[in-house]
């Protein structure tokens, strides 16, 4: 029984971790511990008798919520720190006092209605503690959910909020979770960046005061990922305590860290309260997104491996979850909008010849879309470009021996489109103002049920119209002017979240109705690359930046949370279209082979030796992809701190490993270095380049790195256990 309640302590535990909550003498939920496994009845509770400026409920000076660690916090009563929750009824206070009412221990893991979440395949995999707290004056009842995994050091939290009054309530903040970590010295890692420079790793000291990360862009965004790793100040890649926190949500989020006067650290994570409000009628329930928390006693490396296993097998779904992914050729950087059927078939024929498995038709196949200035919303095949429609093209591609896939961008509408001319109110807009254009497009109002229903019908027909086995789902701008013509002014604070719920419904419907289709999330690259999307689409385009050197950083950063099976990476042409950099085909192929491999340039221009090189690259990928996509990741050299970068994947049964080493810049007359491998079976024998080594030697002595004399050299080592 991994949840107990004894001597006023809730103990949520598995073999590795414990999460302890005290039910206080005043029925508050106080946070006691989240970390390595403890015996709950041995815990000495924090008796904080520090002088408080306000006596608790006017009587008890020794009990102050302003300094006590709590579970789910409200600002404005005794606690004047950051609050997780705030709600208000007309004429009533916004200052709730959430008091314990009851609790329930549930076998399994409840889902969150209309939203993505980690799931259990059977009830033995998780146990859930659901604690109900309430305030009759504000008129709210909250259930705080804590689901612990049997197998992994993972706890998932979310909160549901019910209006138990007979009046309408407005929620102004509803975090998924808050935790008060004990006084200490911490740092945190986050993944920041920008379009074509996503997921750069930064580790900062947690300082006293307020800090954190957020998105206000209507998507999780390229600038910050909804994730932090809180780290003990002394923790590193393979050692020390780390608490990874990853929000399963694809819209505006905030993860804040508030280090208060006594150096305790309040972490609050969930929907960004900026601009958010939600009207809740009597009896209605609002559910927050889920926060997934991984505790690692062995640094960032272990944290990442746990996230990977969990997200790969219990967040991603569908027919492709456990399958290797097809090697694709995409026509975007090959042709942009300028193509006809003949050109496409020329590219796909060459792709099939060198061993590629899927041809993807990107943007420009519909309406009169000859550039990015029109036609989003007019999802009708352009028969000037494709005389036999999608079905004709798909059949011909199939005859060449590879599969057919398609690009879509459902949540957008061009001002120059028949759909916009017919339904101008379907674009997000602020009444009586001009709408801001970005990439010459508007955002369609996904908060409206009739719009989502319309899109379901349109895309259902498209996906039925041809033999489509893959879809790339794009989303190329932020949600400026995020107001809906269908909602009154006082409810515009709901639009961002309603938009996301509408999008999730569209994704859920199409991915369920077309289970054989492999869906890939894309948002101008990785503008919405988060766990929420992975629930519907088991892979994501890693970045619009296809430069191999930049991709070393981006993919290293993405691997902090996301498994390689979700990180799509393409070999493109040189000079690179984003940077103009010229790198060898080998580096481009090696970097892309460390994720889900694809290609994106005009293959019809390949000469014979390049064709041969591609064929060899593809053959090798087919040999290693099982280990890359489903193995455990070990980071070896951090490219943000070195001239090179390296990481490796080890099969779960340790029978194979693949090491990737990328040299960004060469240095004359440089040192000779060894690299120590990780994660192998110490007593097993492995072969590498015709020699046999024990796992022990490979991990403790290592292998010599090649001495590269030129920039942009790289290698991929295949290491196999002797049978
Ligand atoms: C942005 C994507 O990331 C690109 O790969 C491409 O699909 C374009 N959009 C098409 O408009």
Image (cartoon, rainbow, N blue to C red):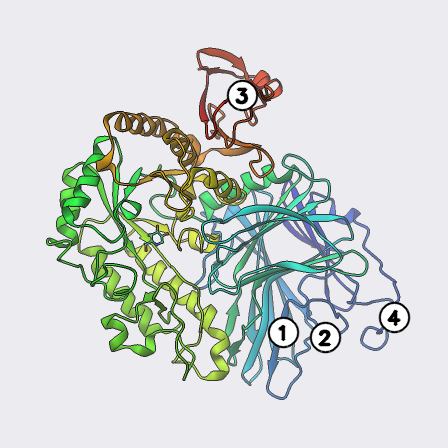
Considering only order in the chain, which callout, 4 or 1, is on the residue closer to the N terminus?
Answer: 4
Q: Which mark is residue 705?
A: 3
Q: Do the residues labelled 1 and 3 touch (CB within 8 Å)?
A: no
Q: Residue 76 carries which label?
A: 2
Asked whether the beta carbons under mark 2 and mark 4 sit within 8 Å of each other, the answer is no
Q: Which of marks 2 and 4 is in front?
A: 2
Residue 177 x %, y %: 61, 60
Percent of width and height locating residue 625: 38, 32
Mark 2 lies on a secondary structure that is loop
Considering only vertical position in the picture, is 318 above or below 93?
above
On the picture, is 7 further left or further right than 84?
A: right
Q: Where is residue 368 in the image (x, y as percent from the top left)?
A: 20, 63
In whole angstroms, how far apart are the C-alphas of marks 2 and 4?
17 Å
In front of the other: label 2 or label 3? 3
The answer to whether the residue labelled 1 contacts the one labelled 4, judged by CB atoms less than 8 Å apart, is no
Query: Which residue is at a point 74% across and 75% down the rendered structure image?
Result: 77
The residue under label 1 is 86
Estimate how packed mark 3 is, as few (under 14), some (14 to 19) or many (20 or more) residues with alpha carbons within 10 Å. Answer: few
- For label 4, the residue is 61
Going by the image, does 501 lie left or right of 137? Answer: left
Q: In which quarter of the image is residue 73?
A: bottom right
Task: Look at the numbered disc 1 and give the secondary structure of its residue.
Answer: strand
Element class at badge 4: loop
- In the figure, residue 383 lies in which quadrant? bottom left
Q: Residue at x 72, y 75 (%)?
A: 76
Mark 2 or mark 3, which has the lower sequence index? 2
The reply to whether the residue tagged 1 has its Cβ within 8 angstroms of ligand 1 is no
Between residue 611 and residue 576, name the one nearer to us: 576
- Would you say the residues marked 1 and 2 are in contact, meaning their CB atoms lie under 8 Å apart? yes
Dot 1 or dot 2: first in sequence order is 2
Q: In whole angstroms, how far apart are the C-alphas of marks 1 and 2? A: 10 Å
């Amino acid at each position: 029984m991994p949840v107990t309640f004894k001597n006023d302590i809730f103990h949520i535990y598995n073999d590795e971790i414990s999460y302890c909550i005290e039910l206080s003498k005043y029925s508050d939920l106080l946070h006691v511990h989240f970390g390595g496994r403890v015996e709950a009845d041995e815990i000495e509770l924090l008796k904080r008798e520090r002088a408080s400026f306000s006596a608790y409920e006017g009587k008890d000076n020794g009990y102050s919520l302003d300094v006590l660690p709590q579970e789910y916090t409200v600002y404005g009563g005794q606690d004047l720190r950051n609050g997780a929750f705030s709600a208000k009824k007309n004429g009533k206070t916004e200052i709730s006092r959430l008091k314990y009412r009851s609790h329930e221990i549930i076998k399994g893991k409840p889902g969150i209605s209309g939203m993505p979440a980690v799931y259990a395949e059977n009830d033995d995999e998780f146990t859930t503690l659901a604690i109900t707290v309430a305030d009759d004056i504000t008129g709210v009842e909250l259930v705080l959910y804590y689901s612990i995994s049997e197998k992994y050091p993972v706890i998932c939290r979310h909160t549901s909020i019910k209006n138990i009054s007979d009046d309408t309530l407005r929620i102004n903040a509803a975090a998924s979770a808050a935790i008060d970590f004990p006084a200490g010295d911490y740092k945190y890692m986050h993944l920041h960046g920008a379009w074509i420079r996503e997921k750069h790793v930064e580790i900062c000291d947690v300082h006293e005061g307020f800090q954190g990360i957020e998105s206000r862009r209507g998507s999780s965004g390229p600038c910050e990922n909804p994730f932090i790793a809180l780290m003990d100040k002394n923790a590193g890649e393979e050692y020390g305590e780390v608490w990874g926190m990853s929000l399963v949500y694809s819209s505006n989020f905030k993860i804040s860290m508030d280090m208060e006067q006594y150096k305790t650290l309040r972490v609050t994570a969930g929907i960004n309260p900026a601009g958010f409000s939600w009207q809740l009628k009597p009896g209605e329930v609002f559910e927050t997104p889920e926060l997934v928390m991984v505790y690692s006693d062995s640094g960032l490396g272990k944290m990442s491996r746990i996230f990977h296993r969990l997200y790969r097998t219990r967040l991603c779904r569908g027919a492709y979850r456990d399958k290797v992914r097809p090697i694709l050729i995409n026509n975007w950087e090959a042709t942009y909008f300028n193509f006809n059927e003949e050109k496409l078939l020329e590219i796909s024929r060459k792709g099939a010849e060198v061993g590629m498995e899927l041809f993807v038709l990107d943007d420009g196949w519909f309406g009169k879309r000859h550039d990015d200035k029109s036609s989003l919303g007019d999802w009708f095949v352009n028969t000037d470009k494709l005389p036999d429609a999608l079905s004709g093209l798909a059949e011909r591609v199939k005859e060449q021996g590879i599969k057919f896939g398609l690009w879509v961008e459902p949540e957008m509408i061009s001002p120059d489109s028949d759909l916009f001319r017919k339904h101008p109110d379907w674009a997000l807009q602020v009444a009586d103002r001009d709408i801001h254009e970005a990439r010459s497009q508007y955002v369609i109002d996904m908060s409206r049920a009739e719009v989502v229903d319309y899109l379901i019908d349109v895309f259902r027909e498209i996906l039925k119209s041809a033999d489509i086995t893959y879809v790339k789902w794009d989303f190329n701008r932020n949600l400026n002017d995020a107001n809906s013509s269908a909602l009154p002014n006082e409810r515009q604070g709901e639009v961002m979240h309603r938009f996301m719920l509408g999008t999730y419904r569209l994704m859920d419907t199409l991915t369920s109705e077309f289970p054989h289709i492999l869906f890939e999330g894309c948002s101008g690259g990785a503008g919405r690359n988060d766990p929420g999307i992975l629930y519907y689409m088991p892979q994501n385009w890693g970045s619009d930046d296809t430069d191999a050197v930049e991709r070393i950083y981006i993919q290293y950063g993405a691997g902090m949370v996301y498994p390689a099976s979700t990180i799509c990476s393409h070999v493109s042409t040189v000079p690179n279209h984003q940077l103009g950099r010229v790198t060898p085909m080998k580096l481009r192929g090696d970097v892309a082979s460390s994720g889900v491999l694809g290609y994106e340039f005009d293959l019809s221009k390949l000469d014979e030796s390049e064709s041969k090189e591609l064929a060899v690259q593809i053959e090798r990928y087919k040999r290693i992809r099982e280990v890359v996509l489903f193995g455990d990741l070990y980071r070896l050299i951090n490219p943000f701190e070195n001239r090179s970068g390296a990481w490796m994947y080890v099969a779960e049964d340790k029978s194979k490993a693949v090491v990737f080493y990328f040299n960004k810049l060469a240095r004359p007359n440089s040192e000779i270095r060894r690299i120590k491998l990780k994660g192998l079976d110490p007593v097993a024998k492995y072969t590498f380049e015709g020699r046999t080594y024990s796992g022990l030697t490979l991990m403790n002595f290592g292998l010599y790195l090649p001495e590269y004399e030129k920039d942009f050299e790289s290698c991929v080592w295949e290491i196999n256990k002797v049978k």
